[in-house]
Image (tube, rainbow, N blue to C red):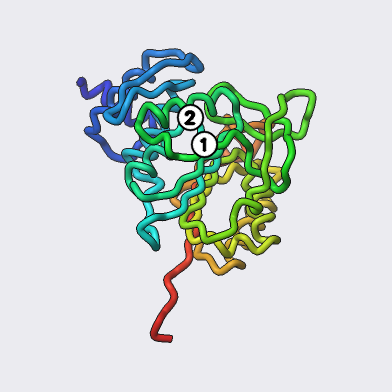
Amino acid sequence: MSRKLLAQINRHTRFHGRTDDPVYLKLARMREKLPRYEPGRFQFPFGELRYADIASLESQYLEIFVQRGYAFTPMNPAPRILDCGANIGLAAIWFAKTYPDARITAFEPGPELHSLLRANLEASGFAGVDAVQAAVWNENGEVPFGHDRADAGRIIKDHEKGRTVPALRLADHIGAPVDLLKLDVEGAEFEVVLDLAETGKLGQIQALICEVHALPEEADKVGELILNLHGSGMMVSTAYARSAPALFNAARPTPFEALSDGKYLMHLYAWREPENDSA
């Protein structure tokens, strides 16, 4: 591989430092050549998986398998993991491979992505993962849902512009400790975490990884989310935050050359520290 191409790959994917992972390098080359939003198949070492968008597949593999963004130390050998916003199943597969005794439930509301999720779990040998077609929310029922044909499906307010998908109240599905709650739900994290706090179910979460999708008009919700996590006794930190002009909603100008608008993504981590037995 030429130095020029490798430099393009690393710059394009925002990977800080080089990687020689052959699977990732092949995906990065495919991303450079293939158009977006066209479905396909890719042969991973653990099975041939179907995807909806090559750019999303490449970035998800980088984050999950190369950068190990979801790796954690569970408190027991059979951790309970809730994967909310499972997309085509890469995170669920990584969880199942890394924690073979884990009890995993993967939630994905989009019908097309949920179909890929189930097919990929079966193709990789992890059909035992419970795959649920529903949006996690603060009440049961149905919600209007918009999507961009890749990985940015989102509960929306305008019933005229979206289709309806099933929704379930996540708090109702937490009756025992959860070792890891992964939330990548495109803005619904604010209402979900607030409901978990108000019902006392947040106290059952031992660790949480959340991709926060922040819009300028929701700045107060980001603070409230962090305060709720702190209020339940959790430590909170972030891996990174970056400008995200591709998020839903119209752009709002800022006075900064380095920031095209006020929208951003933040990877937030929260956890409970072990109790001090000597106290």
Tell me the kind of residue under disc 2.
Answer: Leu
Frontmost of labels 2 and 1 is 1
Q: Position of residue 76 (x, y in %)?
A: 38, 61
Could you give the CA–CA distance between mark 2 and mark 1, rounded to whole angstroms? 8 Å
112 above or below 96?
above
Toward the bottom, the furthest residue is 279
> Which residue does the numbered mark 2 point to in the structure image?
117
Q: Secondary structure at mark 1?
A: strand
Query: CB of mark 2 within 8 Å of CB of mark 1?
Result: yes
Q: x, y (%) of residue 183?
A: 54, 46
Residue closest to the eye, 109 or 252: 109
Q: Which residue is mark 1?
A: 131
Name the amino acid, label 1: Ala
- Give the structural element (helix, strand or loop) at label 2: helix
Quadrant of res 78: bottom left
83 lies left or right of 126: right
Tell me residue 239's x, y (percent).
Answer: 44, 50
Disc 1 residue crowd, few under 14, some 14–19, many 20+, Cα 10 Å: many
- Residues 226 and 169: in front is 169
Q: Is residue 189 left or right of residue 41?
A: right
**Image quadrant where one finds the N terminus:** top left
| Tally of numbered discs | 2
Q: Earlier in the sequence, mark 2 or mark 1?
A: 2
Whether residue 169 is visible, yes or no, is yes
In the image, residue 64 lies at what x, y percent? Answer: 38, 40
Q: Quadrant of the C terminus?
A: bottom left
Quarter of image, res 40: top left
The residue drawn where x is 65% and y is 57% is: 196
